[in-house]
Amino acid sequence: MALGGLAIFMFIIVALNILAAAASLALFAVAIWVAVDGYKLYAISAVSGKDDIFAAAWIAIFTGFAFFLTCMFGIYAALKRSRNLMLVYLIIMFIIFIFECASAITAATNRDYLVGNSNLVKKQMLKYYTEDSSNGNRITDTWNRVMQEGKCCGADGPTDWILFESTYKTNFPNSFIWPENCCEKLSNSEVKDPQSCKVGGQALFKKGCFQHIERVLSHYTWAVSWYGFAVLMFVFFMLLLAMVYYVQLD
């Protein structure tokens, strides 16, 4: 390739690496957002033994930052027009690419397992809500918050607490037929209208919480998996051009 054409190719590689570095930092940021778990739903994943979305987020934190650093190195290698440096760059990028593939696939498959239908979440809720155990405390706190913040009750609705046997029903046979957090509360955490709550009146939240949980986990999956996949496609295209540039170097 003529020197002029090689120079143009070099600037293309540099520009693509700059864009990839920016995309990688964005992946790093959204992966941190998922790992921090702003919606506080980690307990639902962890207790089920399927917390792979969050594991994938930690992988994406590593790969996002690693992509950024390697892109910086790739810019240096391209400007130096060094075959040895470009070869090191390609090898490192390929290794990171594999890790990010694992992250994206893990997050996508885990999401389908957790929110393919409401049965898994419902069974977990009925088993652990108010149970006197570590898992029980985590699930109870999570569901109390979700029901109040989402103004919802149960997984599919208040009837979950009536139609199925539950730890809550066993522990509180003489209390409300559904948890108090299924009803509107005052600022002091007391039920706003206890009588209405007991009989399923206006104070009771009628919708289920599964849609809220599904939406949050889908947001997490999009951040880690689908955005990660988009970064992978861009990096794949960039690596193809980088390989051509490497071959053309003397």
Image: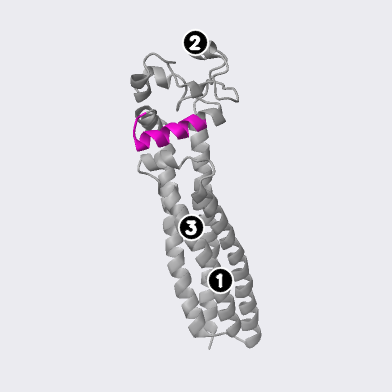
Residue type pointed to by label 3: Ala
Residue type pointed to by label 2: Val
Secondary structure at badge 3 equals: helix
Are there few (<14), some (14-19), or many (20+) residues within 10 Å of tag 2? few
Is 144 in the magenta?
yes
Residue type pointed to by label 1: Cys
Are there few (<14), some (14-19), or many (20+) residues within 10 Å of tag 3? many
Q: Please, which colouring scheme is shown?
A: one colour
Q: Which mark is residue 199?
A: 2
Q: Main secondary structure of the magenta part?
A: helix
Determine the residue positioned at 52% across, 70% down: 239
Place of residue 12 in the rendered image (x, y in percent of width and height, measured from the top left): 63, 74
Q: Which mark is residue 60?
A: 3
Given the current orientation, which residue lies at the most extreme front position? 188
Place of residue 43 in the rendered image (x, y in percent of width and height, measured from the top left): 42, 40
Place of residue 144 in the rendered image (x, y in percent of width and height, measured from the top left): 48, 29
Are there few (<14), some (14-19), or many (20+) residues within 10 Å of tag 1? many
Q: Nearer the viewer, residue 104 or 60?
A: 60
C-alpha separation, residue under disc 2 versus residue under disc 1: 62 Å
Given the current orientation, which residue lies at the most extreme bottom position? 250
Secondary structure at badge 1 equals: helix
Determine the residue positioned at 48% across, 70% down: 93
Place of residue 67 in the rendered image (x, y in percent of width and height, measured from the top left): 52, 66
Q: Which residue is mark 1?
A: 71
| Marked residue nearer the N-terminal end (3 or 1) | 3
Provide the residue span drawn in magenta. Answer: 131-146
Above or below: residue 99 compared with residue 175: below
Is 160 in the magenta?
no
Above or below: residue 175 compared with residue 106: above
